[in-house]
Structure formats: C-alpha cells, structure tokens
Amino acid sequence: MGRSPCCDKNGLKKGPWTPEEDTKLIQYIQTHGPGNWRTLPKNAGLQRCGKSCRLRWTNYLRPDIKRGRFSFEEEETIIQLHSVLGNKWSAIAARLPGRTDNEIKNYWNTHIRKRLLRMGIDPVTHAPRLDLLDLSSILTSPQLNLSNLLRLQTLLNPEALTLALNLVAANSGNPDGLLQKLQENQTFLNPHQLQNQDGTALQPSQFANIVSQETPSNLLTTPSFPNQDQCIQGNMGQFPMNSTDHSNGQIFQENLTTPTTTSGSLIPTDLSSFFYGVSDQMKADMSENSSFDSVLSSPAPLNSASTYINGSTEDERESLCSGLLRFDIPECLDLADFM
DNA sequence: AAACAGTGCAACCGCTCTGAC
DNA sequence: TGTCAGAGCGGTTGCACTGTT
C-alpha cells in the first residue's frame, strides 16, 4: 500500500495551475487520452506529479464538467442523496452529471451545511436539533409567549405542548408564574391539566410533576422544571423550531414543518400524530395539498421543495431550502387565528 | 483608505481500495 | 500470499476575493 510520491519530494511544482500548464495537460490528454498518470506529466512536459495532473483534469479541465452555480434541482438532489449516502461524494457526484465530487463536497461544506445548521437541522443526520438553534432568540421572541403556546393546544400533540411549556418555564425559571398563567388561560387547556381529579386547583409543585410526567422521559430527565441547558441537552427534536423568522405566526408555521427522515429520526414519521384536535376533514384538506402530502409521506419529505419556491438568490435559496422542510398551509388553516 | 473578518473554492494530503504480478 | 503502483476518496489547507468597520 505505498503512498504516491509527494510532489515536493521530487522537486515538482505545487499550487495553482497556470494557463500554460492547463494547455499542456489538455493538449496531451486530447492526443493520448487520460490515464497512466504517473508518466503523463513527464510526457506532457509538466513539472507536476501525476496525482496533481489527475486532480486538475478530473476536477477542473474535463470538458464535460459543468461550471457555475448549482441549480435548485441539483441542490435538492444533493441533500436527498446525502441523507442516504452520507459523505460519499463520489457516489453523489455520479448522480449529478457534470459535477465533480470535489465540487459537491465544497458546495456542501460552504453552503448547504451552514444553511441546514441555521435551520436547526443536523447536517449529518438530517434530523432537526433544537440545540443547533439560537434558542435565546426563540424564547425571547414576543411571538412565543404563553398565550400563543396555549392556543396551540388545540392543534398540537400534548407532549409537544408540554415540552414547549417546559421551554418557557425553563426560560423564565419561574414555574409558579407559569402555573398562574396557565390557570389564567385555562380556557385553552384540557381541564385535567390544571385541576386535580377532585376538581381542586393544582398547586405549583403538582403542576410541575404533571408536566414532567407527561413529558416523555427521553425529553426531560428531571422531575422538576429543567433549566435551559438541560432542555438543550435533551432530545428536543420532537418539537422542532426554527428561528429564521418570528413574525406573523411564522414560528408556528415553521413548527409544523416537521420533516420525516429515515431510520433514527427524532421526529414522528407521521406528522398527523403531531396534531391534536384537528378534524378529519381538515386533515383531508391538508392531505389534498401535494406539498403537505409529501411531508406526511416518509421517507421523501424533500420532494415538495421544488413546488414551493424556485428562488435563485442566496436568501431565496435559504427560504427555498427551508421549504424542503415545509408544506403549504392550506387556507382552511388560518395561522393568524392561532397566534 | 486601510485593516480586519468572513467566505468560497481550488488544490493538496494522507489514507484506502483494487488489480497486476 | 505478499508487494507494489495506480487510482480514488474524504478531509483539510491556503489563498484570493468580498464585505464590514
């Protein structure tokens, strides 16, 4: 398993290629064809190692290489394939004619990866992770107050709501105040959440126990209100959030953009389980929307993106990319009513 | 205008795989 | 079976460019 001779050991040139070197390499390969890279530099009159020539040819000079910006379709393909193949750049490149593995790798590391991180998505697992988000900006958002969360009760799975309540409580560090607010807003809650079985009002400590008991054990590890760090450390993917836009009910919309992934996902594969109290008719209306349907269908949640936005600027692409995890909100579901 | 920081990408490094001998 | 060279791969680096202060 000998390693290829290093260029500098042989006094060969390294660094950027000059146009003259490119011309020599192109002309030689056009005449003799690629291959036999070890002897190629000498025969072509290049002071380069064969490996450098091969890389220059395969990554840059090859006539079938497509230069320029990645299209949305290419970007979508990369994300999809990466979710399946991981960092198998050559395998991904094989599905993208004209693109090299190096180019795809660079594009992933400089664009897509960062974008996914900003969206709170683990670029390795493609699963949403709250600890990747700027939670402070989320939790201090005026849109994410208790009343708004409570109004979500009619739509959200109670576990998700409970988790959100924990977030708020952890943020405020004041469970007593939280209970007070809950009781002030009890019209939005299931009665059993704020009352004992005999109908008497809950005490703060009782409420804290209920919250912790109703929270899945894999989400919270403490019987009382966890601090923010504990929340972050926990498996928060089951209540995905996005910090990109906190205005006009965007949080809720983003919260509904729960992607499904392949095995090991932190999130429900059937988004309908995320809803609570949504009528069958409303679910049916949602399912008629192709984009929403694509979210509900696992494991190809990304297919809807091309129908969502087809932007070309960086901002549009970020919006578009977040669209990979989004579905169109049907008209029957007016988000403004919930926020 | 200059200094600095951030970004993007070409190229390199070092390792593994594969096939010939 | 072991060795070697060629080829391929993923990770990393260095530098030019751009934006910000």
Image (cartoon, coloured by chain):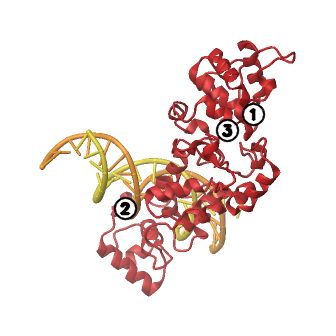
Chain colours: A red, B orange, C yellow
Tag 3, which secondary structure? loop
Q: Nearer the viewer, residue A54 or A70?
A: A70
The residue at 33%/73% (across/down) is: A21
Report the residue marked by disc 3: A239
Residue type indicated by callout 3: Phe
Task: Decide: is A339 above or below A16.
Answer: above
Mark 3: few/some/many CA within 10 Å (<14, 14-19, 20+):
many
The residue at 58%/42% (across/down) is: A251
Looking at the figure, which quarter contains the N terminus of chain A? bottom right
Number of the front mark, 2 or 1: 1
The residue at 80%/54% (across/down) is: A281
In the displayed structure image, the side of residue A20 where residue A29 appears, left or right: right
| Dot placed on the residue nearer the N-terminal end, 1 or 3 | 1
Report the residue marked by disc 2: A10
Tag 1, which secondary structure? helix
Report the residue marked by disc 1: A159
Task: Decide: is B7 above or below A143.
Answer: below
